[in-house]
Image: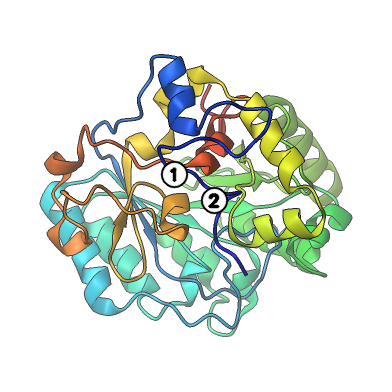
Amino acid sequence: MTNTAVQITRNGKSPFPTSPTSFDEKLAAHNLELRAAAIDILQVNVGKLCNQACKHCHVDASPIRTEIMRRETVEDCLNALRKYKIPTLDITGGAPELIPDFRYFVMEAKKTGAKVIVRHNLTVMFENGQEDLPEFFAENEVEVVSSLPYFLPTQTDAQRGTGVFDKSIEALKKLNAVGYGTAEKLILNLVYNPVGAFLPPSQTAVEADFKRELQTRYEVVFNNLFTITNMPIARYLDWLRRSKNEESYMRKLVSAFNPATVAGLMCRNLISIDWTGKLFDCDFNQMLDLNVESSLPQTIADFNPEKFAGRQIATANHCFGCTAGSGSSCGGTVS
C-alpha cells in the first residue's frame, strides 16, 4: 500500500491540471509562509497497533501492526514535559491504550501539571484488561477525544467496521456514567470524519445535529464535536484510488484553499513524536516521513522547544487538506 499523497510535491509544481501551484506556491501567492509559533503541545503517536482498521485511517493502524513505543521513549517524552513545562500532552495512535506503558505515561504526565488528551477509539475499552478505562480516564481527568463518523450505524460501520457503532454507543454511555460530558473537568469530545470523498460540513451545524440525535436516540451527551478533513495519505488514499475519487478529491481540496486558516494550523504550536522518538511537524508529515528541518534536533531525547519556535514547517500537497474550507486540525475547524 502506498503511503504518499497524490504525486506529492515539496517546493515543486503541482500535478493537478486545474491548479498551477504547489502548496508552497499557493502560500506565496497570498504572501504567507508557514512557520511555527511556540510549542504548546507534545503530540505523541505511540504506535500503529489498533483493535480496528478504519478505512479513513491515515496511520494505517490495525490489529496486525507491531510498532509500539517502548518505555525509554516514553521516558524521553516525560522528561521533555518535566523540563520544559509544556502545557499539553496529546496521546494518539493506533489505539494508544494498547501499549504496555500507556497508563504509566498518563499518570506521570499528570504529575508534571500537563493537560492530557487521549485519542480514544471507544471500542478499545472492550478489549481484555481495558474494561476500567472510563474510571482510569476520570481519575486522571483525561480529556477524551473519540471518532464517531455519524449518529447512525450504517455510516459509522461503513467507515470503521461492522458492529463498531453499537459498541461505540455503549462505550459513550460508560463514559457518561463516570461523569464525562457533564462534570466540569471530564471533557468528552467527538470527531466527525466524512465517510465519502467530500469535505466536512459546518462544524457548528453538525455538532448541533449530533447533540440532538445522540441525546434523543441513545441518551448520550458530550461536550464538543470536531470536524476533521480526511487526509489523502495511507489507507484513505488507497480507498480514493480504488474508488476512482483521487483526482476529484484533490481538486476539491486545492480549490477550497482558505488563506485565513493558515494562522490557526495545528502544526504551528505542536511537535509530533513517532513511536521511535523521531520528531515531525505534524502527525500527517510523520506518516509521510517528512522530517523536521535537518538543522534541528531529530529526536525527543534532544528536544529543546526554543530551537523549534519559528522553524519553517515542512509542507507538501497533502497540506491542502488542512487549509480547505474552514480548515482542519486535531481540534476541528480553525477559521
Residue in the image at 73% along x and 43% along y: 247
Circle nearer the viewer, 1 or 2: 2
Residue in the image at 78% along x and 33% along y: 209
Q: Which residue is mark 1?
A: 185
Which secondary structure lies at badge 2?
strand
Residue closer to the observer: 299 or 241: 241
Q: Position of residue 24 (x, y in %)?
A: 43, 30
Q: Position of residue 25 (x, y in %)?
A: 45, 26
* Mark 1 Cα-neighbour bin, 10 Å: few <14, some 14–19, many ≥20: some
Q: What is the three-letter code of the residue carrying label 2?
A: Val
Q: What is the three-letter code of the residue carrying label 1?
A: Lys
Residue closer to the observer: 26 or 184: 26
Above or below, 322 against 157 in this view is above
Above or below, 239 against 224 in this view is below
Q: Which residue is mark 2?
A: 145
Residue closer to the observer: 318 or 94: 318
Q: Is residue 279 left or right of residue 266?
A: left
Measured Cα–Cα span from mark 1 to mark 2: 14 Å
Above or below, 243 against 332 in this view is below
Residue in the image at 52% along x and 76% along y: 49
Residue in the image at 67% along x and 39% along y: 250
Q: Residue furthest right?
A: 154
Q: Position of residue 40 (x, y in %)?
A: 28, 40
Q: Is residue 115 left or right of residue 184?
A: left
Which secondary structure lies at badge 1?
loop
> In the rendering, which numbered label is found on residue 42?
none
The answer to the question of whether label 1 and label 2 lie on touching residues, with beta carbons closer than 8 A, is no
